[in-house]
Image (cartoon, rainbow, N blue to C red):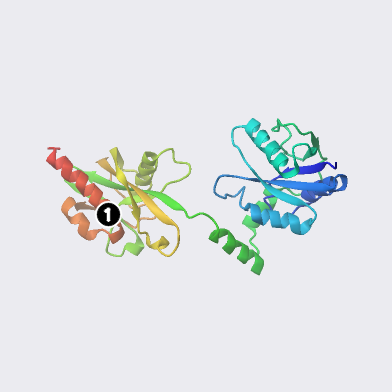
């Protein structure tokens, strides 16, 4: 019974580079059956893993029609379970008694695999890395029809995104005033201070404090209270599948002179009762949460 040559790879590239081709060629010459197991993740695409399985499978099969491809799911945190799953998948495809030889190259899986099949390392071919190829695409976009079609495909087949933001009502409880911001597109209307959650933020509270600092010129605030969350009908996302979910905070002004910074063009204090009339429509549900909190505080004698 012939052995099966199994290549474990990701191949997150627009085309197979010399290293990929050298690996496939070396295995293809030794076996009647050559298989490429393409790693897949239970996560959204990112800059290191931009291509879905079907796109990569088609790339391999067009270059090597005689090669089979199958998806191999990542199991983060457990090389043992990943190895068991790989052995089971090969057994399901080729039978439990079919001999498979796994092949690894540069930065391969050899040290991660703890299964029952032998692993051989193929000498590395001189070539550009997949990481370098992806950086080249990011830095130098192509002006071809296929490139634009690929961008459209990638955007259209990704999962919808719920963008996370924060909005903060900075209040002066002694004077019963709230600080509101203004952007050029607001015209004569205002908004709560806020912005998008950054991947480097440690918490929503961290984001809220950062946004206040960035947009008000480092005024001092304290006593952040999370009031809740609500979907915002942001005009930038009304015609697509992506939406915005904001977390609403209230924070107490301590001292400092507010100066419009970052993307704000204006800041102004308003008495609590006047805020609703000057806010943009999409911020009215946020103010309703703030107003309900302020009313409860008054009812509690605060």
From the image, tell me which residue sits under label 1.
Answer: 285
Position of 3 compared to 112: left or right?
right
Residue 160, relative to residue 82: is it above or below? below
**Residue 40, percent across and down?**
63, 46
How many numbered discs?
1
Closer to us: 249 or 122: 122
Position of 201 compared to 38: left or right?
left
**Residue 25, percent across and down?**
84, 49
Q: Quadrant of the C terminus?
A: top left
Q: State the residue at coordinates (72%, 50%).
A: 69
Splitting the image into 4 quarters, where does residue 152 fall?
Answer: bottom right
The answer to whether residue 144 is visible is no
Circle 1 Cα neighbour tier, 10 Å, few/some/many (<14 / 14–19 / ≥20): some
Residue most extreme to the right = 29
**Residue 100, percent across and down?**
79, 39
Q: State the residue at coordinates (41%, 62%).
A: 236
Q: What element carries label 1?
A: helix
Residue 171, relative to residue 243: is it above or below? above
Q: In which quarter of the image is the N terminus?
A: top right
């Amino acid at each position: 019974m012939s052995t099966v040559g199994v290549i474990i790879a990701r191949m997150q590239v627009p085309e197979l580079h010399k290293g990929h081709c050298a690996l496939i060629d070396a295995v293809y010459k030794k076996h009647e059956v050559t298989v490429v197991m393409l790693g897949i993740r239970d996560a959204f695409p990112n800059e290191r893993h931009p291509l879905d399985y079907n796109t990569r499978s088609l790339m391999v099969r067009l270059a090597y029609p005689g090669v089979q491809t199958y998806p191999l799911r990542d199991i983060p945190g457990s090389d043992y379970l990943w190895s068991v799953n790989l052995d089971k998948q090969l057994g399901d495809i080729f039978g439990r008694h079919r001999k498979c030889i796994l092949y690894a190259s540069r930065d391969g899986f050899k040290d991660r695999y703890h299964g029952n099949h032998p692993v051989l390392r193929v000498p590395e071919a001189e070539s550009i890395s997949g990481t370098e190829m992806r950086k080249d695409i990011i830095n130098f976009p192509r002006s071809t029809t296929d490139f634009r079609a690929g961008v459209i495909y990638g955007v259209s087949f990704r999962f919808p995104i719920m963008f996370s933001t924060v909005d903060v009502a900075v209040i002066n409880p002694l004077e019963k005033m709230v600080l509101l911001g203004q952007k050029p597109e607001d015209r004569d209307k205002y908004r709560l201070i806020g912005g998008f959650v950054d991947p480097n933020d440690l918490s929503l509270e961290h984001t809220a404090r950062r946004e206040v600092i960035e947009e008000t010129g480092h005024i001092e605030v304290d006593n952040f209270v999370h009031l809740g969350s609500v979907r915002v009908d942001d005009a930038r996302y009304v015609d697509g599948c992506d939406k915005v979910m904001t977390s609403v905070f209230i924070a107490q002004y301590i001292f400092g002179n507010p100066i419009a910074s970052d993307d704000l063009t204006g800041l102004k204090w308003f008495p609590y009762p006047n805020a609703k009339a000057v806010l943009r429509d999409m911020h009215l549900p946020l103010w309703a949460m703030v107003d309900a909190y302020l009313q409860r505080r008054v009812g509690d004698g605060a």
